[in-house]
Image (cartoon, helix red, strand yellow):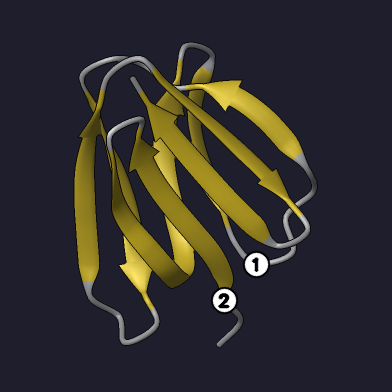
Amino acid sequence: MSTFHLRIAKPEKKLFEGDVSYCQFSTPEGSMGVKARHEPFLATLKDGTEFVYWLENGDEKTQVVYNAMISFKDNACVLTMT
């Protein structure tokens, strides 16, 4: 299964860092899903929604987001929250 690197962080600490197979989230424009080798993008996330990601072993994890931005480039995804 293809994976990409995901980092979830707040200014004061890292919440998660590792390889995942897929992530799903909501932006003000609608829902979006990301797999490995997605084209580059930058987006804001809709406050109070869940950012869902799947680990390499298939486990599903969630993170509620507020004041969040997400970027994807070079098969790496960064989610930052303030």
Q: What residue is rendered at 53% in x and 45% in y? A: 78
Total numbered badges shown on the rendered structure: 2
Label 2 SS: loop
Residue 22, relative to residue 55: is it above or below? Answer: above
Residue 42 placement (x, y as % from top left) = 67, 28
Please tell me which residue is depicted at 57% across the width and 76% down the height of the picture: 3
- The amino acid type of the residue labelled 2 equals Thr
Residue 82 vs residue 62: left or right?
A: right
Circles 1 and 2 in contact, beta carbons < 8 Å: yes
Image height of 77 relative to 32, above or below: below
Which residue is pictured at 21% across the width and 50% down the height? 62
Task: Please tell me which of labels 1 and 2 falls first in the chain.
Answer: 2
Q: Where is residue 29 in the image (x, y as percent from the top left)?
A: 54, 14
Which residue lies at the image location 72% right of the left edge and 55% below the top edge? Answer: 38
Which quarter of the rendered picture does the C terminus lie within?
top left
x and y percentages locating residue 16 in the rendered image:
31, 58
Q: Which residue position is annotated with label 1?
A: 36
